[in-house]
Image: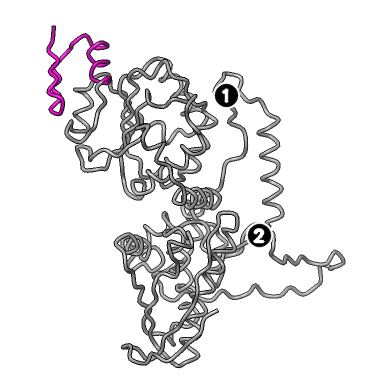
Amino acid sequence: MAKVTNAYDLPARRVIHTVGPKYAVKYHTAAENALSHCYRSCLELLIENGLKSIAVGCIYTEAKNYPREPAAHVAIRTVRRFLEKHKDKITAVVFCTTTATDTEIYKRLLPLYFPRDKHEEEVALSKLPADVGDENGETIIDERKIRIKPLPAATPNTAKLPPPQVDPPVTDVGLTRRRNSAYLDSYLDPAFMSIIKDPDQRRIEQWEKASQAQGGFNCAKLLGFGDLGGPPLSVAEEYSLHSRYLAKANSLNLSEIAEMKIIYRGGVDSEGRPVMVVVGAHFLLRCLDLERFVFYVVKEFEPLIQKPYTIVYFHSGASLQIQPDLGWMKRLQQILGRKHQHNLHAIYVLHPTLGLKAAILALQLFVDSVVWKKVIYVDRLLQLFRYVPREQLTIPDFVFQHDLEVNGGKGLIVDPRTKYVYHRP
C-alpha cells in the first residue's frame, strides 16, 4: 500500500510513500505483483488527492535483491495500463533514475510500452516480452483464472449475448494487436490484448508433448549426445527462467569461476560489436560446478545480449578435454533466452576439429539451427584477425603455439603483447 503526506519544505505539493517487496526466486510472481501494486497504489493516491503529475523513483533496493530489468518492465507496464484508464486525469508521469544502469534500462524499455511512431511500434512488436500482465499490469496466472463454460443443458435456441466490447487503446500508436500478423503471435502472448486459448487445453497439450518427448525415439541420446527430450519452452517461460537465474547470479560470489578464465570479455570486432571470448581448454569439466558455471555465464552475458555481439571460441588444445553433452547445451541456451539468439551475430571457432564439427552439426539438428548456423570456422589466427583485430583480444600463449604446430608456420603471426614472431619456415 501507499500513503500520502505533506511535502513541507520539499519542492512538491505532496509526497507519496511506499515500500517495495523483497525479491526471492521462489516467489517471483508474488514479488512482481507486489511491486506492480506499489506503483498502482501511488497513482491511485495521485488521483484521489486531485494531483496531475508525479515523479516516481525505482521502487527497489540492492538489499532486497530485485533484478533491475524485470522490475523496470513491471513499473512501465503498470503505468501504461493505469494511463489507459485514467489518461484524462494525469498530465505527466516522470521516471527518475539515479544510476547509469537504470537510465540505460529505462531508455531501452520505454519505447516498447510507449512507442512514439510507427517504427518504434514495429520494434515493440518483436521485442515485448510475452508476460506483460493483465489489465492492471499484474502477472497472469492461468491456473488461478475463473473459467465459465456454457451449461450442458443449454439449447440451440438459447439467445446468445453479443461479444464484449474491447476498450480502444490510448492512442493509435500503442500496444495494439494486428490480428493478421502471425509474426506478432510468435512473440507475444495474446493474453496481453485479447482472449487466449483455454488454459486447461493448453496445459493438456503441454503434457502430451512432454509424454511424446519422453516416450519417443530419442536419436540424440542413442548417439551419445545427451538427453534432448522435453517440450520446447514458450517465450514467457524462457523469460521467467532467465530472470530467475539472473537474480540468483547477482546474489552469488562467483569469483572462483572467474579465475578459471573460461569466459571473459574481449574488445570489439571489426564492425564495433562487443566480443565474448571462450577458451575451451580451460573448461575442465571434472573440476567445475556446472550449475555455478551457468550462473556465471548468465551474469557475464547479460550486458552483451542486449545488443548485437560476437563470440570467439578457442578450441586450441581442447580436443582432449571432456565436453558437456548437448542436453546441457540446450538447457544453457534456454536460460540465456531468445534475446541471445536474436542478437548473436556470429561464433568464430578457432582450430576446429572433426569431432567439434560433428558436435556443432548435432546442435544444428537437435537443439537450434538458428544459433548454431552462425558458426564460422577459422583455421588460423591470421584468418581470425580479419574478423576481430588482434588488439581487441586477450589470447593465451598456448593458442599461439598450437596455431604454429597445426598450420606448420604458414603465414606470419606477430603478437604485439608478448613480441612473439612466427615466421614461415
Q: Which mark is residue 220?
A: 1
Q: Residue 7 lies in magenta, yes or no?
A: no
Q: Position of residue 33 (x, y in %)?
A: 56, 67
* Residue lying at the far right of the rendered structure: 153
Q: Nearer the viewer, residue 130 or 58?
A: 58
> In the image, which residues are magenta?
398-425
Q: Could you tell me which secondary element the residue under label 1 belongs to? A: helix
Picture quarter containing residue 219?
A: top right
Q: Is residue 411 magenta?
A: yes
The secondary structure type at the circle numbered 2 is: helix
The percent coordinates of residue 333 (x first, y second) are 47, 39
Q: From the image, tell me which residue sits under label 2.
A: 142
> Toward the viewer: 126 or 412?
412
Inspect the image, locate mark 1, and give the three-letter code of the amino acid beneath it. Ala
Question: On screen, 324 above or below 39?
Answer: above
| Rendered image quadrant of residue 11 | bottom left
CB under 8 Å between discs 1 and 2: no
Q: Position of residue 322 (x, y in %)?
A: 47, 20
Q: Amino acid at mark 2?
A: Asp
Quadrant for residue 26, please give it. bottom right
**Left or right: residue 231 compared with residue 416:** right
